[in-house]
Image (cartoon, rainbow, N blue to C red):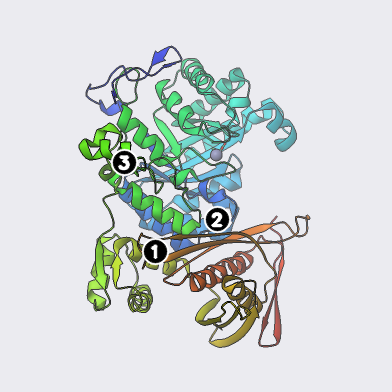
Amino acid sequence: MDSKADVGDVAGQSFGQAIGSAIAPDENVRIFDTTLRDGEQSPGISLNLKEKVEIAEQLARLGVDIIEAGFPIASAGETEAVQAIARTVRGPVIAGLARVEPGDIDRAAEAVGSAERARIHTFIATSEVHMRAKLRMTPDEVLQASRAGVERARGHVADVEFSCEDATRSDPEFVAQVFRAAVEAGATTLNVPDTVGYCMPQEYANLLTFLIREVDADVVWSVHTHDDLGLAVANALAGVEAGARQIEVAVNGIGERAGNCSLEEVVMAIRTREVGSRQAVATGVNTTEIARTSRLVSMLTGYAVPPNKAIVGANAFAHEAGIHQHGVMAERTTYEIMDPVDVGLDGSRIVLGKHSGRHAFANALVELGFTLSPGDIQKAFDRFKELADRKIRITDVDLEAIVVEEIGSEADQYELVSIQVAGGTHLSPTATVRLRRDGEVIDESAIGDGMIDAACGAVQRATGIEARLESFNVSSVTGGIDALGDVTIVLAVGDGSPESPVRRATGRGVSTDVVEASARAYLSAVNRLFSLAARGGLGWTAEQETNGQRSETVVEAAG
Ligand code: KIV
Ligand code: ZN
């Protein structure tokens, strides 16, 4: 494939003109990762503090420039998570999101305060529908609030990003006016969100071109695109062609509704096609960490990556048709425009076996980049030993799955002690589970349509939760007959009324046995529902029955 070909015109400028030219430092595109903020706003994702720190550490290894660690005003738990990331993660700038309100901005400042380099990202909506129906503010009030918000943020930090929410459905003249006020107040990055994924690439490029010309300021222009029409990556690239030098992305493209611009897609598009109208641009991402980052985010969020997903899908580099296989064997570039090695897909390595000791296990974790406490290493090692008895060779990818399951279990109320199942052609499928909660043992049994149904039913009875099963997904961690089964379950509570909003939690379990993996995934989702309730804001009442004793966790809806 000729990567030097012109592929189209955007805002009067064509892609690929400057291929081969050296990349000047000012042509670097900053990668602003919002997996932990916009990405975490996906239904059913609720990462705990430890999981967020683990993802942030991996984003730093990946080489992103800015990590948007969260929206601190959203809850005390969110503030703590942003604080923990600011304290521990080194390398990238750590940003906290805030509306232009004083309370939001002060909370964001408090949360990112101990970062090596801190940023406050503040925003307000500028479209007619948002100002009228959501904010109930006049354009003039929005203008004044923007100025005041940025000034307040600058009182805390030198690095302030300002966004006009729903910019692409706003009056461009008004957006330019608001941006000018933000620059006067001290904003250093201006972000142009296509909040509802409505824009076409040409329109988005034209909007950026117009704003850059009209605002005429020494700032970094940023693109933030959503994927409602499947155009998030195309729009982000069009924005870069028009002069933007920051792209806001999420790993695996997760995020509100159809998601955000996918990190791996936009980074590999820039690398493969050397995007840039005047000069080729580049990112500072270490692309060989992409596959691992994608797996980590998928495992911790419970959001499976579709097999045909660009760059990180299981089939992204698979060749099915004989003619393709033949071509690739003769010369890889016949059907591959990227080298799988460049995105970190060089096959899983066998790292451990059942005779491996604690020392070898701990070393393998360090090599994989995990930094666990001695207690967590012990827990993960116990789980590894259990699995190694049943699976002869444990690969690096298996190990990741085991460790990630342990990291996710930090705040668990219930622990699975054992599971027994019976079934067959003439027996009703039956499962018995033993759980532990605060040292107390709970035994329950259930009959189901199949073994998995029975196992999940037994967990439901033991925990006493009334939740609906919304989705069930099973895949294997690696290939082969002895692969670990990887089950993801989404549970929901609430009837959708104002008193009882629908809340979802995703759980994940891995085991050599898919019935056990399913019970683990179901229990993990239940634990997350209880931990959401404990953190507040759910507005539902969780009733639990433990060996006949009913207890109630009543949680008020967040204000
Ligand atoms: O989509 C959006 O508008 C946002 C802003 C908060 C930047 O996420
Ligand atoms: Zn967004």
- Residue 336 placement, left or right of 12: left
Distance between the Cα atoms at labels 1 and 2?
A: 18 Å
Q: Between residue 493 and residue 432, name the one nearer to us.
A: 432
Q: Position of residue 444 (x, y in %)?
A: 62, 84
| Residue position marked by numbered label 3 in the rendering | 285
Q: Check disc 1 and report its element: helix, strand or loop.
A: helix
State which quarter of the image contains the C terminus: bottom right
- Residue 15 placement, left or right of 366: right
Q: Check disc 2 and report its element: helix, strand or loop.
A: loop
Give whichever of discs 3 and 2 has the lower sequence position: 2
Q: Are marks 1 and 3 in contact (CB under 8 Å)?
A: no
- Residue 465 placement, left or right of 109: right
Residue type at numbered disc 2: Ile
> Residue sitting at 64 percent across and 71 percent down?
449
| Residue position marked by numbered label 1 in the rendering | 401
Residue type at numbered disc 1: Ala
| Quadrant of picture, ligand 2 | top right
Query: Is residue 116 shown to the viewer in this render?
Result: no
Q: Which mark is residue 45?
A: 2
Is residue 273 positioned above or below 389 on the image? Answer: above
Give whichever of discs 1 and 3 has the lower sequence position: 3
- Of circles 1 and 2, the one toward us is 1
Quadrant of residue 316 within the rendered picture: top left
Crowd rating for badge 2 (residues with CA inside 10 Å; few <14, some 14–19, many 20+): many
Q: Position of residue 307 (x, y in %)?
A: 44, 47
